[in-house]
Image: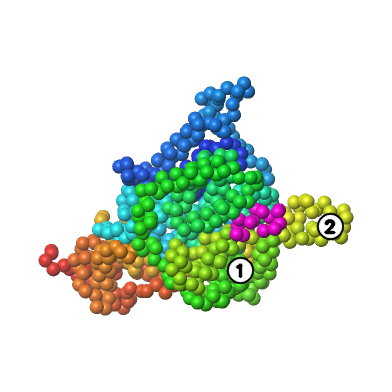
């Protein structure tokens, strides 16, 4: 594990972890620590929203300093307002300053420590198998995120208008709103470590997200009465069940991170409503929710449904005064960080555009897509439903389906079996969003279109949003099977009647099912196809970093490099090596397009496209020094914007360097020819 990875994890965890000391030792503090990444993102949101409004420095580093200061002040304030946190002295007197500022340690039980650590290591191991050893994260949007992160670093500002631009030089604003909290964290880690942005992003997808998932699921299951072994199985199962890894294939790492922490944020909300510290938990829950809004916005829907289910399931009768205090604290803590952004958040233009429903009026096909197609339940959720046919002839895939589908059906009994009350919120949330996906895929009603626009009308995003559900419900079904076997054995043998009240049958059944599924997932025939898909969507080989270093060393100061946007993975030269690029984020609808169109005019002119208009003046103004092409291309039908034979015939660029299949052309005087200039 390199220094950049360690710093990326520290930046993402330390500020949020400090907030745990605002709570007393015990389950409340552990619940807060399970939500650490979301709390850090909440602090990031608070700082990045208000620093510019207050006229203070708003660089990524300044935001990090503000995060640590805010966390420290929150802990200090919690110690001074010590009601319920510091016990009074034996004689009944109020605790003194030293007692208030003391931070008592809390030691986890060994079973809980093992129960979190083992699933976390399992998740990271599968992440390394599928996503490790790549030059950069896969997917088109990973390069968009890399651009946004580098813009934050180069501009010295976390303002959306500074990051979301048409290019690196002579930029125009491309979007009015974009949730940038994770990008700010990536910029902080890259600046502190001096490492590559892609390394930081990869650390999130392989380590931070999977470990956060293990902690969140384990904490949620334990808080609702699940035993340590069952909770550990539930935390490990999503490593092979559901699209946790597939959610990053498009490059949206935040699409993995937000659902990973959803269980922990939902638990904070539930404890704020039903727990003994409604104000403190409410403030943390609201802050974490704001962090999710500025990381992957629509995941708050899943968190809300899950939190409601947890609040109803928690033991004990509700105390209405505490419930009101928790709600008020959450509202304040969520609103304050987002207040400066409410205008752009509610009035975003292109961010609310969505694809039309794919199966209008075809409810039978929609039901098959969302419920009955067995491809939905294959290991790793790959390939996607409706994509190319999966190989049922692969033994590991066959056996996995024979285990998963019966377990999912049995999980419905969680609604009536008390030992499975920990699974009820996940079951309800899974059913709710599956039905919403079914409806919005087949209906073009205004209500359905409005709802689906929150996830841009892309139905696979709903599946990614609830990806932990598949693993947890499979474990719930395994527990039902274990309880049923114990009941049958107790009927046949009088000595075995003690099994009915024992946690052993549930633990054994869950362990056997999860270990079997993990073993099937570790079979190369199971994980290699999704690994191959990841490799097809990123820059592979040594030629890319070598070409990027050459550009870094030879590009004139202030100049930019032009290439066919993300299509050939060249955008990582800017994100990782700070080589300014021609194309940034395309302007979203409602924003001016002139600046971006001039960039395409310059590109078409240099690569000698058919019907290209003279654009030497644009080449000069944008200061384009090199044009780069390659042969490796992003799959998915992305249009190619040049022809190799016409580039070879162009007098506007000249080949000066080649590394493997990557060709670097220098812009000639003919390419910079501009009437009226010398």
**Is 69 in front, or is 342?**
342
Residue 135, horizontal then vertical, whole percent = 45, 60
Q: Which comes before the other along the chain, label 1 or label 2?
A: 1
- Quarter occupied by the C terminus: bottom left
Query: Within the magenta stretch, is there residue 501?
Result: no
Q: Which residue is mark 2?
A: 490
**Is 650 in front, or is 58?**
58
State the extent of the magenta-drawn residues as a range: 415-428
Outermost residue, right side? 494
For residue 97, say whether it is visible: yes
Q: Secondary structure at mark 2?
A: helix
Q: Is residue 575 left or right of residue 88?
A: left
For residue 129, say whether it is visible: no
Q: Which residue is mark 1?
A: 378
Q: Secondary structure at mark 1?
A: loop
Residue 592, horizontal then vertical, whole percent = 27, 63
Rendered image quadrant of residue 146: bottom left
Outermost residue, left side? 676
Q: Are marks 1 and 2 in contact (CB under 8 Å)?
A: no
Residue at 41% over, 55% down: 179
**Is 286 in front, or is 148?**
286
Magenta segment main secondary structure: helix
> Gap in Å between the C-alphas at discs 1 and 2?
34 Å
């Amino acid at each position: 594990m390199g220094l950049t990875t360690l710093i990326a994890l520290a930046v993402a965890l330390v500020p949020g972890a400090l907030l745990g000391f605002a709570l007393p030792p015990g389950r409340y503090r552990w619940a807060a620590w399970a939500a650490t990444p979301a709390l850090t993102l909440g602090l990031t949101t608070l700082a990045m929203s208000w620093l510019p409004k207050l006229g203070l420095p708003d660089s990524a580093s300044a935001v990090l300093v503000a995060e640590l200061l805010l966390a420290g002040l929150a802990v200090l304030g919690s110690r001074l307002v010590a009601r319920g946190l510091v016990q009074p002295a034996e004689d009944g007197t109020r605790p003194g300053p030293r007692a208030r500022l003391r931070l008592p340690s809390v030691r986890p039980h060994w079973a809980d420590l093992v129960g979190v650590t083992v699933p976390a290591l399992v998740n990271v191991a599968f992440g390394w198998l599928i996503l490790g050893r790549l030059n950069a994260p896969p997917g088109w949007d990973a390069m968009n995120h890399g651009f946004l992160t580098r813009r934050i670093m180069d501009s010295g500002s976390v303002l959306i208008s500074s990051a979301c631009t048409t290019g690196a030089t002579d930029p125009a604003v491309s979007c009015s709103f974009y949730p940038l909290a994770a990008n700010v964290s990536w910029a902080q880690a890259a600046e502190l470590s001096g490492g590559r942005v892609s390394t930081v992003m990869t650390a999130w997808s392989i380590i931070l997200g999977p470990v956060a998932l293990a902690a969140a699921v384990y904490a949620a299951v334990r808080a609702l009465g699940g035993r340590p072994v069952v909770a550990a199985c539930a935390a490990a199962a999503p490593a092979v069940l559901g699209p946790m890894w597939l959610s990053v294939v498009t490059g949206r790492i935040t699409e993995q991170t937000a659902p990973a922490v959803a269980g922990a944020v939902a638990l904070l909300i539930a404890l704020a409503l039903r727990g003994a510290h409604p104000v403190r938990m409410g403030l943390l829950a609201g802050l974490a929710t704001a962090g999710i809004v500025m990381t992957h916005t629509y995941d708050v829907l899943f968190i809300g449904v899950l939190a409601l289910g947890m609040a109803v399931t928690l033991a004990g009768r509700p105390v209405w005064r505490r419930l009101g205090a928790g709600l008020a604290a959450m509202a304040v803590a969520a609103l304050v960080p987002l207040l400066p952004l409410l205008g752009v958040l509610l009035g975003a233009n292109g961010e609310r555009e969505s694809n039309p429903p794919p199966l209008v009026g075809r409810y039978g096909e929609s039901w098959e897509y969302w419920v009955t197609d067995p491809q939905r339940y294959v290991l790793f959720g790959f390939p996607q439903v409706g994509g190319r046919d999966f190989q049922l002839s692969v033994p590991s895939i066959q056996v996995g389906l024979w285990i998963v589908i019966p377990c999912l059906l049995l999980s419905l009994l969680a609604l009536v079996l008390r030992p499975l009350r920990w699974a009820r919120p996940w079951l309800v949330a899974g059913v709710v969003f599956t039905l919403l996906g079914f409806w919005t895929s087949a209906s073009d009603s205004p209500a359905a279109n409005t709802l689906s626009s929150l996830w841009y009308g892309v139905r696979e995003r709903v599946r990614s949003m609830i990806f932990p559900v598949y693993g947890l419900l499979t474990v719930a079904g395994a527990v039902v099977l274990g309880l049923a076997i114990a009941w049958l054995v107790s009927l046949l043998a009088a000595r075995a009647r003690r099994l009915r009240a024992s946690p052993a049958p549930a633990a054994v059944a869950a362990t056997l099912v999860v270990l079997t599924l993990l073993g099937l997932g570790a079979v190369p025939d199971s994980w290699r196809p999704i690994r191959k898909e990841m490799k097809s969507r990123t820059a592979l080989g040594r030629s890319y970093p070598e070409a990027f270093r050459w550009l870094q060393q030879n590009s004139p100061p202030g100049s930019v490099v032009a290439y066919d946007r993300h299509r050939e993975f060249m955008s990582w030269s800017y994100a990782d090596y700070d080589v300014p690029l021609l194309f940034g984020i395309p302007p979203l609808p409602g924003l001016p397009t002139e600046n971006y169109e001039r960039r395409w005019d310059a590109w078409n002119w240099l690569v000698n496209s058919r019907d290209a208009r003279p654009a030497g003046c644009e080449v000069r103004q944008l200061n384009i020094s090199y044009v780069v092409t390659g042969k490796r291309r992003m799959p998915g039908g992305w249009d190619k914007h040049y022809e190799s034979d016409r580039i070879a015939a162009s007098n506007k660029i000249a080949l000066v360097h080649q590394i493997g299949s990557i060709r670097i052309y220098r812009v000639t005087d003919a390419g910079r020819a501009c009437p009226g200039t010398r």
